[in-house]
Image: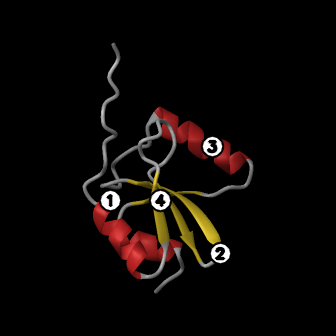
Amino acid sequence: MSFRRKAKVDKNQAQIVEALRKVGAVVKHVHQLKNLFDVLVFYRGNTYCVEIKSSRKSKLTEGELECKQELESVGVAYWVIYSVDDAMKMLKIR
């Protein structure tokens, strides 16, 4: 019998998601899907594929890196953010 482990969530993810929602973004969690990214963010007609890391020293996993490269190969941006400030910059909120 095989058991699926719970996907790891970076400690700053809740704070970043809360800040995004406060400015009116819709945030959907997809971190449970292996080799993807953490959240989809919808804001003012735009969709953002976002990987949240707790530190700038944190590296993308091999699967995350492959996803990033695949999405970017078809013109889709893959955002890696580390803070609420990064999230606001992504949405172009000052």
Residue that numbered label 1 is attached to: 13
Is residue 36 positioned above or below 50 on the image?
above
Question: Dividing the image into 4 quarters, which one contains the N terminus?
Answer: top left
Q: Is residue 55 left or right of residue 31?
A: left
Amino acid type, label 3? Gln
Residue sitting at the far bottom: 94
Residue that numbered label 3 is attached to: 69
Q: Earlier in the sequence, mark 1 or mark 3?
A: 1
| Dot 1 and dot 4 residues touching (CB under 8 Å) | no
Residue sitting at the far top: 1
Residue sitting at the far front: 1
Residue 45, picture quadrant: bottom right
Residue that numbered label 4 is attached to: 28
Amino acid type, label 1? Gln
Amino acid type, label 4? Lys
Which tag is nearer the camera, tag 3 or tag 4?
4
Q: Earlier in the sequence, mark 1 or mark 4?
A: 1
Q: Is residue 90 left or right of residue 84?
A: right
For the point 49% across and 83% down, which residue is it?
93
The residues tagged by marks 1 and 3 sit, at their Cα atoms, a distance apart of 23 Å
Residue that numbered label 2 is attached to: 45
| Dot 3 and dot 4 residues touching (CB under 8 Å) | no
